[in-house]
Image (spheres, rainbow, N blue to C red):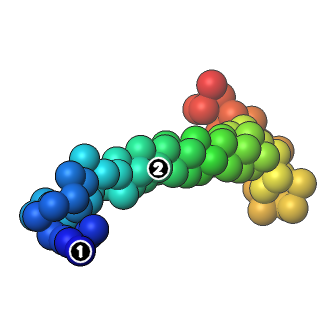
Amino acid sequence: MPMMFNSGDHPYRGRMGWGPFSFMPLGGILFWLPAIIVLGAIITGAIIIIKRQRTKTGPLDILKVRLAKGEITVQEYEKLKQDIL
């Protein structure tokens, strides 16, 4: 009785390993790896956009805070405001 899964007798398990199925894991990796990278980039971009919107402080806002803290006078505030605008 011949062996059923001899290396040369089976059409899919010949000398090439699993035959046409030998590259299936590589195909899965080539599909999922870019998908995960793109998803990560989208999530990272969304987080960056949200953080920028929360901390939207321009030079005029900084001047107002400095005036409120008493770091600058009203005259300095007005002069710096005119320089900014």
Tell me the element at label 2.
helix
Residue 49 vs residue 1: left or right? Answer: right
Locate the C terminus and report the quarter of the image it occupies. Answer: top right
In the image shown, does 19 or 3 lie closer to the viewer?
A: 3
Q: Which residue is mark 2?
A: 32
Does 38 sit above or below residue 8?
Answer: above
Sequence-first tag of 2 and 1: 1
* Residue occupied by mark 1: 1
Please identify the quarter of the rendering in which residue 77 is found: top right
Left or right: residue 51 compared with residue 41: right
Give whichever of 25, 44 is nearer the camera: 25
Specify few, some or many for label 1: CA neighbours under 10 Å numbering under 14, 14-19, or 20 or more. few
Between the residue at mark 2 and the residue at mark 1, the CA separation in whole angstroms equals: 44 Å
Q: Nearer the viewer, residue 4 or 37?
A: 4
For the point 36% across and 57% down, the residue is 25
Look at the numbered disc 1 and give the secondary structure of its residue: loop
In the displayed structure, would residue 83 be above or below residue 29? above
Q: Going 24% across and 54% down the picture, which residue do you hit?
A: 12
Q: Is residue 16 visible?
A: yes
Q: Quadrant of residue 84?
A: top right
Can you name the residue that lies furthest to the front here? 1
Which residue is at the front of the view, 41 or 58? 41
> Is 36 left or right of 9, judged from the image as shown?
right
Q: Is residue 38 left or right of residue 10?
A: right
60 shown above or below 41: above
Q: Position of residue 41 (x, y in %)?
A: 52, 46
Identified by mark 1, the residue type is Met
Given the image, on which type of amino acid does mark 2 rest? Trp
Q: Residue placed at 23% from the left, 74% from the top? A: 1
Tell whether label 1 touches label 2 (CB within 8 Å). no
